[in-house]
Amino acid sequence: MKKHWNMETDIPWDRFDRSLVDDDTVKVIKAAALTEYNAPHYTVYLRNIFHADDQFQAISYQWADEEVQHGLALGRWSEMADPGYDFQAAFKKFTSAYVIPVDKEKSIRGTLQGELLARCLVETGTSSMYSAIADSVEEPVLKLLCRKIAADEFRHYKLFYTYMQQVPEAEKASLLGRIRVAVGRLREVDDDELAIAFHCANEADQPYDLARCNKAYSSRAFSYYRRYHVERAIGMIFKAVGLKPHSWMAKLASNYAQGVMKDRVAA
Ligand SMILES: [Fe+2]
Ligand SMILES: [Fe+2]
């Protein structure tokens, strides 16, 4: 299957406008580019987990191709915004500091449904973040790029969500199990991956520190979110877990998430 857009032909790189670039956005985009570009590594893990499923193997290659393009395109934009920046050098630093354990034969989420649910949550996070950045920044190349990436991330969510409905009975999780997976994956937002990416992309002069780098990343990344981005993301999470996306519980969760994000931005 072909990618939905091509970074060489569908992005008007010559419209880049340096006067509309802000430093905080450059920092966030540099970190995001590193994690996107690292996706093929994660497909090794996914292909191990779904070793008996040819259809999913094919899907995972297409997915990884699109994530790599996100990384390359955001990396190119980062180098245009900061001409002294070397995306590939930062990526090398990132992959030696952050190693994903891929040699698993069973999903760390317990079941294939749990694994696909965790993927849905990651795609919820990326689709909402690129939508929020696209709605917030003025620089025209980044704005368009983030719109195109967000569209891919929404499609990825749909892909994993659809596949989740087809897993065999023995690979399904109970509602409680699904809630546990969702809460666990949401907590991982504070793990090393994004914090190390932020460090490798932006800090040459100080040692890595999880708490400091996590704060530096999330205070910037969450600043783009508006109420409707959070509400949509919570709806997508509820739907993936198997709960009603338009319910009082979803509203409560959305208000809570907005409060947490506001605190992070202000911290
Ligand atoms: Fe992506
Ligand atoms: Fe994605």
Image (tube, rainbow, N blue to C red):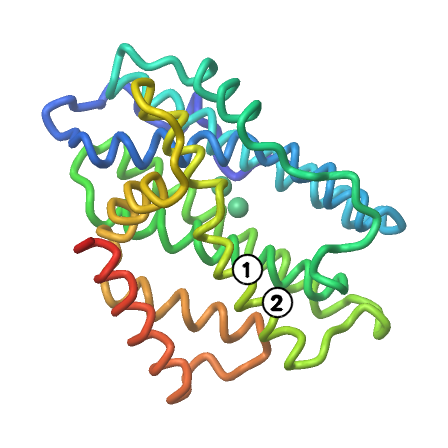
Q: Secondary structure at mark 2?
A: helix
| Residue located beneath label 2 in the image | 181
Q: Position of residue 119 (x, y in %)?
A: 60, 55
Q: Residue at x 37, y 26 (%)?
A: 207
Name the image quarter holding residue 9: top left
**For residue 131, above or below residue 11:** below
Q: Residue at x 44, y 49 (%)?
A: 126
Query: At label 2, which amino acid type do we have?
Result: Val
Residue sticking out furthest to the right? 52
Q: Which quadrant: the N terminus?
A: top right
Q: Position of residue 137 (x, y in %)?
A: 19, 41
Q: Are marks 2 and 1 in contact (CB under 8 Å)?
A: yes
| Residue located beneath label 1 in the image | 185
**For residue 246, above or below residue 66:** below
Q: Secondary structure at mark 1?
A: helix
119 lies left or right of 60 = left
Name the image quarter holding residue 134: top left
79 lies left or right of 210 = left
**For residue 26, above or below residue 108:** above
> What is the total number of numbered labels drawn onto the structure image?
2
In front of the other: 132 or 255 = 255
Query: At label 1, which amino acid type do we have?
Result: Arg
Q: Residue at x 68, y 59 (%)?
A: 115
Mark 1 is surrounded, within 10 Å at the Cα level, by few (under 14), some (14 to 19) or many (20 or more) other residues, namely: some
Q: Residue at x 57, y 59 (%)?
A: 120
Mark 2 is surrounded, within 10 Å at the Cα level, by few (under 14), some (14 to 19) or many (20 or more) other residues, namely: many
Q: In the rendering, which numbered label is found on residue 196?
A: none
Residue sticking out furthest to the top? 84
